[in-house]
Image (cartoon, helix red, strand yellow):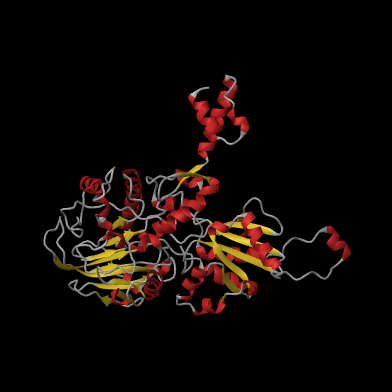
Amino acid sequence: MTRAAKRHREASPHPCAELAPRNAEEEADQILQATEASLLLFPCPLCQRSYASSDIDRHVNACLDASPAPTHDDKAEESAFAVHTKESRTVLTSKWAAILPERPTKAAKKRVPFYKMLEGMPLSVDAFRYGRIDGCEGYFLTHFHSDHYAGLSSRWEHGPIYCSEETARLVHKRLKVAREWLCPLPMNVPQLVPRTGGVRVTCIDANHCPGACLFLFEGPRTVPTIRNGPAASQEVRYLHCGDFRACPAQTAHPALKKQVDIVYLDTTYLHPQYNFPPQAQVIEACVDVLLRPPRRPTLADLWHGPTECEPQAPLVIVGTYSLGKERLVKQLARSLHTSVYCAQTHRHEILLELDDAELHRMLTRQPLEARVHVVSLQWISHEAVASYVQALQKRGMRITQTTAFRPTGWTFQRTQASLAPTRQMDALLQASRPPDFRASALTSMTPSTAAVRIVNMPYSEHSSFYELLSFLLTLHPVRVVPTVNVGSAVSRQRMQAWLDVCARASAAQRCVQPRSPDYW
């Protein structure tokens, strides 16, 4: 048996696959099948690992909600705040090489990435995993997702934590961080940050999850930079996006009327292959699926005339990983005039910490009282949903049809992958703009039956490629610093090519008109 055939035998569970190819034609056929299978593997935009089409959606959502950010950074002898303001490509390449070594050492894992620090300001954003940072006077948290608050616990004592009021409540209740370290910030009101030489910060809704915000920093650079030398009294403006779903309401914010010097950008989906419809359209489509008649009348129905139909008793199940699907859950509950039940107690408790009175009124701890149930995304399979429904029916709940919504987070469109940064911006925008989304575009997982159907929906809380382009072309920042997918030179170069396209179009004052106040 050849080495390749032996590997094939060990990898395949099917007994027929244990046989080595008996002739050249059979061997060619096996090679063709393997090639076709490899073409069905899709790369994760975060970790770059490849997965089959049936697994990639689940992995990407898990990666988004729980994966740690890169943990390597600047040269140890340099201050974490001392970064270049105008780097050449050569300087930038060498800096990334120092930050992200091929084989990181234990010491390197503790170095703070320069994009976690604000240039020339003694402030960090989402950098809690690095512990105490020399010279840092304020630690900012964009939102309550584990890959951003990692490192926070009851033992935190390294400095003040600035975040939204909702996030502060969650950090205290769930992570047991002492209140003395928490500095809740109001939305849309500039606040002076102590011990920074006059830096002000404004919280802007990030359109990501409850409590998530963009931070607009305005003030002098009070920390020397490598390129510019001593600190400067000239005021600069930085916008840190954390994780966000870009929308016109953000760029229309009064605080963003002046030009922004640096945008620290959530570049999770900065590639044409990551395109998905506006969130509002997806929610509307899901409601339409629920309210759509179960089936068209048959010829027999028309022949026998109208009959008294049994009233519908639907059950809706929404799979989630963490905060962020509340808009969908609320709209589904409104459409059915029902309550919301969280199958996991800790999830229920988290929702009660949110500043959302309407959601609080919807919540119940009695599963039989609610027609909308929130469960872990891992439970969304035909077998698990069927078992869940049977358990409810045994307890006396009448259910005529169950619809389980499985948020995929993103949609892979192979046709968009061919777009190149050499194209003109008008053509690029036209090709990457997703069409209007309707209920007919929602797909059901196999197997789905008349009684139980599992519906995939492209519901994302990160910006699509088209939205990132629209955001940058509307904001016209001087410079953009990527904060996601920075772990490899290839990924950084690919993103920089798209950012260069935006910079050229921005210089020509190109702008994108929104389709609504909620999306471009």
Image coordinates for residue 380, horizontal then vertical, percent: 58, 57
Residue 106, relative to residue 347: is it above or below?
A: above
Is residue 26 visible in the rendered image? The answer is yes
Residue at the spot x=79%, y=61% of the render? 297
Residue 32 is left or right of residue 67, and the answer is right
Residue at the spot x=24%, y=74% of the render? 193
Label tally: 0
Residue 342, image quadrant: bottom right
Q: Which is nearer the eye, 463 or 361?
A: 361
Residue sitting at the far right: 304
Residue 138, image quadrant: bottom left
Q: Which is nearer the eye, 195 or 290?
A: 195
Residue 193 is left or right of residue 416, and the answer is left
Is residue 457 visible in the rendered image? The answer is no
Image coordinates for residue 100, horizontal then vertical, percent: 28, 47
Residue sitting at the far top: 23
Q: Which is nearer the eye, 358 or 269?
A: 358
Residue 114, relative to residue 22: is it above or below?
A: below
Image coordinates for residue 251, horizontal then vertical, percent: 37, 67
Residue 2 is left or right of residue 333, and the answer is left
Residue sitting at the far left: 230
Residue sitting at the far front: 155
Residue at the spot x=16%, y=67% of the render? 222
Image coordinates for residue 61, horizontal then vertical, percent: 47, 56
